[in-house]
Amino acid sequence: MRVEQVDWAEVPAGLLRRGTPVDEVAAVARRYADTGVPAEWYMKEAPRAEIHIPAFRIARTPVTVGQWALFAAATGRPVPQTPVDHPVIGVAWEAATAYCLWLGERLGLGVRLPTEDEWERAARGDDGREFPWGEEYRTGLANLVDLGIGTTMPVGSFPEGASPFGVLDMAGNADEWTSTLYAPYPGAPAGVPSSEDWAFDRHITRGGSFRHDRDLARCARRHGAYEPDLEAIGVGFRLAAPAE
């Protein structure tokens, strides 16, 4: 795919039912108790709020190795050895942002990383669904650890796992940077950390990667790059831009 051929999905202006109601957090933690995630991690999703999100565009799939290779060649960066149709991973937040600026200049467009709220809007659609495809988790709709692949797959490999706006790979395959620094939601429960100073990078990532469990596939799940080996944990990114 040439750099000019970004496949954009149009996300209309609308209400995002962001996060998780406080009184449902305990039930969420019990539902995913087998993953070993402590209940307090889910508290970062609370409270539920309705947020108006202006219209925007988001790339239908994460940035691929092939797309990244053009940028890498122009800026003297290494190119991963994985196939060109796989998502590029191991990308630091600063490098992902640099790619957006580089591509934006070539396209004459305000290309950027999505905000955390935009990412969740693109994943959830107009309702408060648990996963991009609906309420129930189903193995085979995303490249997560239960699939047993152990590495990335070509982007768009799971069309039945698409979000309501036709956005693909919003669960699994590559964890995705957003432009948003971690902070508690307004009105967050007591005990939710005001910062995550232990994180390798404090920008929120979303969606989970091939090495993550199904809890990270949830539309509401907030997390970050807690380990410095971004390739091992599968961190990549997708693009956003103003609406047409």
Image (cartoon, rainbow, N blue to C red):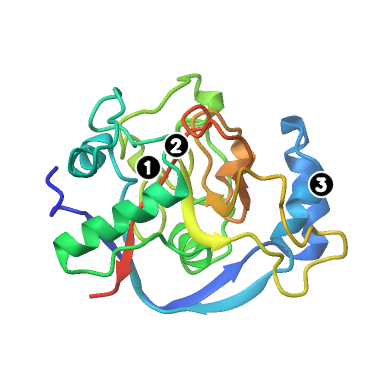
User: Do the CB atoms of the residues marked 2 and 1 lie less than 8 Å apart?
Assistant: yes
User: Do the CB atoms of the residues marked 1 and 3 lie less than 8 Å apart?
Assistant: no
User: Do the CB atoms of the residues marked 2 and 3 lie less than 8 Å apart?
Assistant: no
What is the distance, in whole Å, between disc 2 and disc 3 at their CAs? Answer: 25 Å
Of 124 and 228, nearer the camera is: 228
Q: Which mark is residue 39?
A: 3
> Residue 216: percent from the left, percent from the top?
60, 42
Residue at disc 3, secondary structure = helix
| Residue 86 visible at all | yes
Amino acid type of the residue tagged 1 in the rendering: Glu
Q: Which mark is residue 141?
A: 2
What is the distance, in whole Å, between disc 2 and disc 1 at their CAs? Answer: 6 Å
Amino acid type of the residue tagged 3 in the rendering: Ala
Q: Which mark is residue 187?
A: none
Judge the density around disc 2: few (<14), some (14-19), many (≥20) Cα neighbours within 10 Å: some
Of 57 and 131, nearer the camera is: 57
